[in-house]
Image (spheres, rainbow, N blue to C red):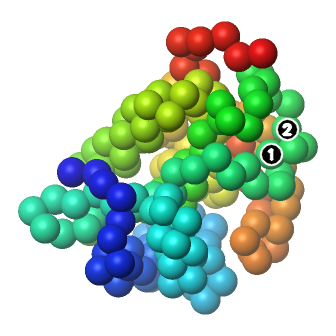
């Protein structure tokens, strides 16, 4: 089940961040995040306060999280998007996390499917996602799900220097956007 997070979910979301940081520090995965910089507890708390933090729960355990909103990071302005849309019709998925202990179960794909349905329900037909160039697993998944890499933009991302941010888009095409 994927749902909006409640306050009591914050610890579980932060634990997933910590699991990912640990796996990256151990060389098991490469996401491009830095412990103590991004993501941190304040990342989850800010999303919760805005009401755009979502969690994937299975048998009472939070196994994934993500932020879904219309906030486009500054680097997006430097991209040449294939489908221009006003901000009201753009939906963005940020900080999709899946617990490394629950990997390879299709939870990331399930979350993206939820994101797409949520976007449609909120009259958003242009979907945008970003990820670190180093995150090859996410890039492969997004490609399989029909997202196109539009640009790779050098930036400082959430306090992390020297990030090559991959910008992806998917146009749902169910409505013409001026």
At 65% across and 31% down in the image, what residue appears?
A: 89
Is residue 100 shown above or below 37? above
Q: Secondary structure at mark 2?
A: loop
Residue on which disc 1 sits:
76
Q: How many marks?
A: 2
Question: Which quarter of the image is occupied by the C terminus?
Answer: top right
Is residue 110 shown above or below 126? below
* Label 2 crowd (10 A; few <14 / some 14-19 / many >=20): some
Q: State the image quarter where residue 160 is shown.
A: bottom right
Circle number at residue 79: 2
- Spatial CA distance of label 2 from label 1 is 5 Å
At 13% across and 68% down in the image, what residue appears?
A: 60
Would residue 13 be found to the left or right of residue 74 on screen?
left
Q: Residue 40, image x and y in percent?
A: 55, 82
Q: Residue 5, image x and y in percent?
A: 35, 65
At 27% across and 64% down in the image, what residue appears?
A: 63
Q: Nearer the viewer, residue 2 or 104?
A: 2
Q: State the image quarter where residue 114 is shown.
A: top left
Q: Residue 8, image x and y in percent?
A: 29, 80
Is residue 123 shown above or below 100? above
Q: Is residue 99 visible?
A: no
* Label 1 crowd (10 A; few <14 / some 14-19 / many >=20): some
Q: Nearer the viewer, residue 132 or 82?
A: 82
């Amino acid at each position: 089940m994927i749902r909006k997070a409640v306050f009591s979910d914050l610890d579980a979301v932060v634990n997933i961040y910590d699991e990912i940081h640990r796996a990256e520090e151990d060389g098991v995965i490469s996401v491009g995040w830095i412990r103590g910089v991004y993501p941190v507890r304040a990342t989850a708390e800010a999303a919760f306060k805005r009401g755009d933090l979502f969690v994937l729960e299975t048998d009472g355990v939070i196994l994934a999280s993500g932020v879904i909103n219309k906030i486009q990071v500054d680097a997006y302005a430097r991209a040449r998007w294939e489908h221009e849309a006003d901000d009201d019709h753009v939906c963005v998925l940020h900080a999709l996390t899946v617990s490394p202990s629950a990997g390879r179960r299709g939870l990331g794909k399930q979350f993206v499917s939820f994101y797409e349905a949520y976007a449609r329900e909120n009259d958003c037909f242009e979907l945008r996602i970003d990820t670190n160039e180093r995150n090859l697993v996410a890039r492969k998944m997004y490609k399989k799900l029909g997202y196109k890499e539009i640009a790779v933009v050098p930036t400082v991302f959430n306090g992390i220097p020297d990030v090559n941010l991959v910008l992806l888009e998917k146009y749902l095409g169910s409505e013409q956007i001026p």
